[in-house]
Amino acid sequence: MFEWLNTPPSWCGGQEELTVTTGRETDFWQHTFYGFHRNSGHAWLAPVGGDFTLSARIVGQYQALYDQAGLMLFVDEENWIKTGIEFTDGMMHFSVVVTRKVSDWSVIPLPDASPRDELRVRLTRHDDAVRVQYRLGSMDWQMARLAPFGAGLARAGIMACSPQREGFSATFRDIAIGAPIPRRLHAD
């Protein structure tokens, strides 16, 4: 059963289609580079254990620096992963932040993407590893990250943040948590 971590000021829908509008200056981040701790982002999460794949299709109205929408795997305020589109340097990037007491950040520029483009994202946990993949349009699934992460109980779902403003809106479709995809990392 999904429940909100930091309920947004406006939201409607469910797993088939969920629209979220963010509150003022919301984010998830722990210390690295910026020196601050933020746990105010909006996340709609369900309990998970063992191996699984979390997936969703996402469209957002990205405009301001760091507007972001995507998936989240959450253990506690110091141990989580968020991934999806993040708007920075005037364009969309596929972003992954892995936090184990401190946050790291990796980005893949998407210079040909527009805010109207739908992004498909999936996060798969196999034992103590998490694989993050994305797909824009008809492209093949692209691996963005393979990271070590605990295999214990957690919560997983979607997240949206707007660190520089309020009122960022994102729509998530076909939010699903199910059996993990095969462990194969590369196409045959």
Image (spheres, rainbow, N blue to C red):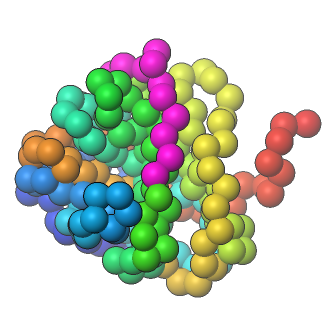
Image quadrant in which you'd find residue 1: bottom left
Q: Residue at x 83, y 42 (%)?
A: 186
**Residue 65 spot, x, y in % from top left:** 23, 36
Horizontal arrangement in the rendering, residue 145 relative to residue 47 (left or right): right
Q: Residue at x 60, y 78 (%)?
A: 150
> Which residue is farthest bottom?
152
**Residue 29 spot, x, y in % from top left:** 32, 63
Q: Residue at x 49, y 74 (%)?
A: 100
Q: Residue at x 25, y 41 (%)?
A: 67
Q: Is residue 125 magenta?
A: no
Q: From the image, give the main secondary structure of the stretch colored magenta.
A: loop
Q: Is residue 51 above or below residue 184?
A: below
**Residue 105 spot, x, y in % from top left:** 46, 52
Q: Quadrant of the C terminus?
A: top right
Horizontal arrangement in the rendering, residue 119 relative to residue 162 (left or right): right
Horizontal arrangement in the rendering, residue 37 relative to residue 45 (left or right): left
> Which residue is farthest top?
112
Image quadrant in which you'd find residue 124: bottom right
Evaluate whether residue 156 shows in this view: no
> Which residue is farthest right?
188
Evaluate whether residue 118 shows in this view: yes
Q: Nearer the viewer, residue 85 or 141?
A: 85
Q: Which residues are magenta?
A: 105-116
**Residue 70 spot, x, y in % from top left:** 40, 48
Image quadrant in which you'd find residue 117: top left
Horizontal arrangement in the rendering, residue 109 relative to residue 11 (left or right): right
Q: Is residue 15 above or below residue 112?
A: below
